[in-house]
Amino acid sequence: MPEIAQILYVSEEICEQVRRIGRAITEDFAGRSPVLISVLKGSALFLADLVREIRLPLRLDFMSISSYGPGPERAGRVRIVKDLDQDIGGQDVILVEDIIDTGLTASYLLSALRSRSPSSLDVCTLLDKSVRRIAPLPIRYRGFDCPDKFVVGYGLDYAERYRNLPFILAIEDYAALAEDPEILAGFVEADTPSE
Ligand code: IMP
Ligand code: MG
């Protein structure tokens, strides 16, 4: 059977990057207490692991957004479905993303957050699909520079599946996945990566 997906980052590599970013944030924000904002649902897993590597008195908040328009090229038309619970005025804010692809979503979120006058605003993303960037944006913390492939696992989904994979898969045959979204179930059920 031709390969539909292969492991791009194993959990040890992910863990190593999460630790490295956690240490960097701890150093950069020493003496301060940043507010980490995660965009549901994809970045919730990254956030949960990341905050346990940050030795600072921080706070969390969550936003949920929906993208308009058909297909993967949604032109960055974003609506806030669930807003923050806290006022971020005068706070050090870090936007935590699972993946930044075209950058349109993050750009929209950054301008929405900037309008609330935080004292600082930084972007942290586990995956940076930099070759796809349409809207340039400053990324202060990045785990991996990700190849231009659709990826799932460690929070990232296809049709709400595969968020619970402890590793990240690159999809090699997107058409096969689109035809049968459950086609990668073997990766979910396996005890350890099969590759
Ligand atoms: P952007 O606006 O193009 O940067 O899109 C970012 C959003 O698209 C992410 O927050 C993800 O929800 C989704 N996305 C982009 N690339 C992938 C991928 O490879 N796998 C899963 N979701 C993705
Ligand atoms: Mg997302």
Image: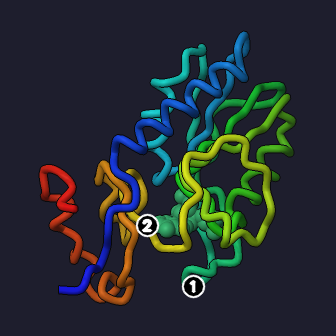
Image mark count: 2
> For residue 176, which quarter of the picture?
bottom left
Q: Is residue 42 left or right of residue 93?
A: left
Q: Amino acid at mark 1?
A: Pro
Where does the image place residue 147, in percent across and percent down from the top left? 54, 68
Residue 47 higher or lower than 30, as above or below? below
Where does the image place residue 23, in percent across and percent down from the top left? 58, 24
Residue 93 higher or lower than 190, as above or below? above
Residue 59 higher or lower than 62, as above or below? above
Q: Within 10 Å of the Cα at label 1, are there few (<14), some (14-19), or many (20+) other Cα atoms?
A: few
Which label was assigned to residue 151?
Answer: 2
> For residue 96, which quarter of the picture?
top right
Q: Within 10 Å of the Cα at label 2, are there few (<14), some (14-19), or many (20+) other Cα atoms?
A: many
Q: Is residue 168 left or right of residue 116?
A: left
Where does the image place residue 120, in percent across and percent down from the top left? 82, 32
Asked if the beta carbon under badge 2 is closer than 8 A to the nearest atom of ligand 1, the reply is yes
| Quarter of the displayed picture in which ligand 1 can be seen | bottom right
**Residue at 55% of width from left, 15% of height from top?**
55
Q: Report the Cα–Cα distance between label 1 and label 2.
A: 19 Å
Task: Give 65 or 12, whichever is nearer the viewer.
Answer: 12
Task: Give 25 or 12, whichever is nearer the viewer.
Answer: 12
Disc nearer the start of the sequence (1/2) = 1
Q: Is residue 168 left or right of residue 121?
A: left
Q: Quadrant of the N terminus?
A: bottom left
Say which of marks 1 and 2 sits in front. 2
Q: Amino acid at mark 2?
A: Val
Which label was assigned to residue 70?
Answer: 1
What element does badge 2 sit on?
strand
What element does badge 1 sit on?
loop
Q: Is residue 39 visible?
A: no
